[in-house]
Structures are given as structure tokens and as C-alpha cells.
Image: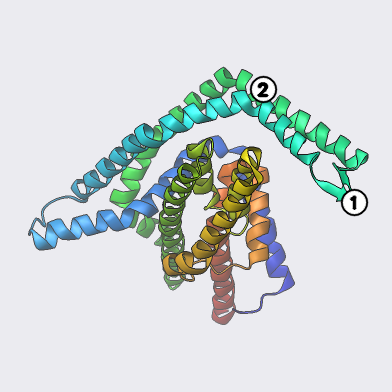
Amino acid sequence: MAKHSIQYWLRVTMISIMAILLLMGTKAVALPFVVSFVLTLILLPLVNIMQDTLQKRFGLTWLPRSIAILPAFLLVALLLYLATILVLTPFLTEFTRLVANFPSIMSQVYGLTKLIPTGPGETGLPPQIEAVVGMAITRIGNYGVELAQQGITAVFSFAGMLLELLLVPIITFYLLKDGRQLKRSIINVFPEPTTKHLYDAFNQIHQTVGGYLRGQLVLATNMFVIILIVAFAYDLPYPFVLALLAFIAEWMPIIGPFISAGPAIVLAALIGGTLAVKVAITYFIILMIDSQIIMPKVMGHIIKLHPVVIISVIFIGGSLYGVIGMMTAVPVTAIIQIIMEKLWYFNKFYKEEQ
């Protein structure tokens, strides 16, 4: 990678900060477009395969591209229906029970801290630490109660988000149908040979982010199934909550495994110390296989970011947009990285032309 000047990085940093602030102010408007962009990248290979099959194998060259999009939409609708029946319904049942039992669970966790050995013949935490832990557990328990009491507000908020997401299938359809023409129209605004660099940037973003999203979807689904089986095998409470947590955490590289393993080990510890050890060892084995064998096979070297950068952007994304920000931080950073590299090439090109 070429070395960039301090002035260049300062310009890029300022532009990135301004873009983030603008996105924060317009996130309600941007959400349908972001979701549509993600769905387009995931579904695009399927639509292309379907179109090539209809036109080349069956000789239906006269069929419009919109016909090839229909099976992809039907597949998404079927998957959403099955996910609602098989996953979302039991998850909501378990989550409601978890929220109701949350204060009791936190009290049991607090009781476990009194069994921690601190010296010869002594158990329990030092008084200062015990006071802090007790205060934290009380606040967490109160938050759980407040969360249950605010269920109606959450439902209305979710309904509002659904109204925003009604635009998603429409935007996704036109991106899948006319995405190539739209890209060509935007790029052709610029003069030659700048268009060549822009095409390179668009293609690299498409390959990188599309490959990342499809790979992560496979990894997250795989982790959901495995953790669900483990939870039922060990008879852990709230198996669908633990499995869905593992699915979401899989989208957060490096720190995600710790997020998903912690609650499972704590719930197992409330049942018995031996079970907690078994669950911890099982999670460790699963996560090692996932990170060292499965992930390299599925993902390869799609995202070329340093682990420190990944951890940092995940925390920044979480502070700005919560869980969604943590899940999308890595691909967004990959896009910014590609744009910065291409901007450098633009600068180099213009210097050579001048």
C-alpha cells in the first residue's frame, strides 16, 4: 500500500467524521437504504445465476431481469416466514420469561459471588468490591424491570421501524434490476480516465462487502444451529435466546465470541459448577473450530483490517448505533478503506496529469 501524507489522512479523517455525523442525523432516513444495499449484495449472485439460467439454458433471452428477481424475493419471504415460526416465536416467549425472571437471576449471580474464595478459609468479595457489584446488579435488575414495563413503547417503536422498512423491498428490487445502469450513470458523470478508477472502486467494494456479508451470514447461521443444539443438549434455560445471541455476536469479529459465551456460562453456573465448566469448554472448542478452521475457509482474506482497527470500529459503531452499529462496523470500515486507497490513486493520477 502506498504511503500517504499527513495532510491526506487529515482530509480523509475530517471527511469521514463529517459523513458519520451526517449519517447520525439522518439515520432514520438512511436505514431503509442501508438494509436494501445489504440485501442487494446478498441476493445479487442468486439473481445473476437465475437470469443466466433462464436466458442461456432455456433460451429465454427475451425475459426481463425483473422475472429473475422474483424467485429471490420468494426465497427471502419463505425464509422470513420459517424464521418467524421456528425461531422468532419461541425466542419471544423465552425472552419475555427472561425479562420477568431477570431480577431473580441477578440475585442468584450476586449469591454466587459470595462463594468466591478470597483467602484461607474465607469466601466472598472484599466489602468495597461487593458494594460495587451489588450496586451494579441492582441497577441491572431494575433495568430489566423497566424494560418489561416499557414493552408497549418498544412495540410502537418497532412498528415505526417497520413502516420505514416497508421501503426496503421496493428499493432492493430497483437496485437488483437497475443497479448496473445506476452505477454507470453515476460514474459517467466524471471525465475519462477518472471513470476507470471509479469502476475499480465500485467493483472492489462490491466484491469485498458482498463476499463479507454472504460469508458472515453462513457463519452466523452455522453458529446459531450449533449453539441451539448445545443448549438443548445441556438442558440450558433460554436456548433460543442463547442461539440468537450467538448469531448476532458472530457478526462482531474478535469480541463476538466473548459476548455469546458469557451469558451461557453464567446460566450454567446457576445450575451447577460442573455444568458451567462443561459449557465453557464446549464453547471454547466450538469457537476455536469456528475461528481457526471454518471462518478461514468461508471468508478467506476478504477483509484486510488489523485486529486493533476491528475492535475499535466495533466499539465506535456500538456507541453510535447500538447492536446494528457493531454488526455493520467492519464492512463500513472496509468500504472506507477502499475509498481512501482509491482517493490516493486519484490524487496520484491528478498529480501526474498536471
Query: Who is closer to the viewer here, 212 or 69?
Result: 212
Q: Residue furthest bottom?
A: 352
What crowding class fits label 2: few (fewer than 14 Cα within 10 Å), some (14-19), or many (20 or more)? some
Residue 60 position in % (x across, y down)? 9, 55
| Quadrant of image for the C terminus | bottom right
The count of marks equals 2
Residue tagged 2: 145
| Quadrant of image for the N terminus | bottom right
Q: Residue furthest left?
A: 59
Given the image, on which type of amino acid does mark 1 rest?
A: Pro
Residue 191 appears anywhere in the view: no
Residue 346 position in % (x across, y down)? 55, 72
Given the image, on which type of amino acid does mark 2 rest?
A: Val
Dot 1 and dot 2 residues touching (CB under 8 Å): no
- Secondary structure under badge 1? loop
Q: Quadrant of residue 200?
A: bottom left
107 left or right, relative to 339: right
| Mark 1 or mark 2, whichever is nearer to me | 1
Q: Is residue 110 above or below residue 215?
A: above
- Secondary structure under badge 2? helix
Residue for point 64% across, 65% down: 307
Residue tagged 1: 120
Q: Is residue 270 above or below residue 275?
A: above
Residue for point 20% across, 55% down: 50
Q: Distance between the Cα atoms at labels 1 and 2? A: 38 Å
Residue 81 position in % (x across, y down)? 32, 35
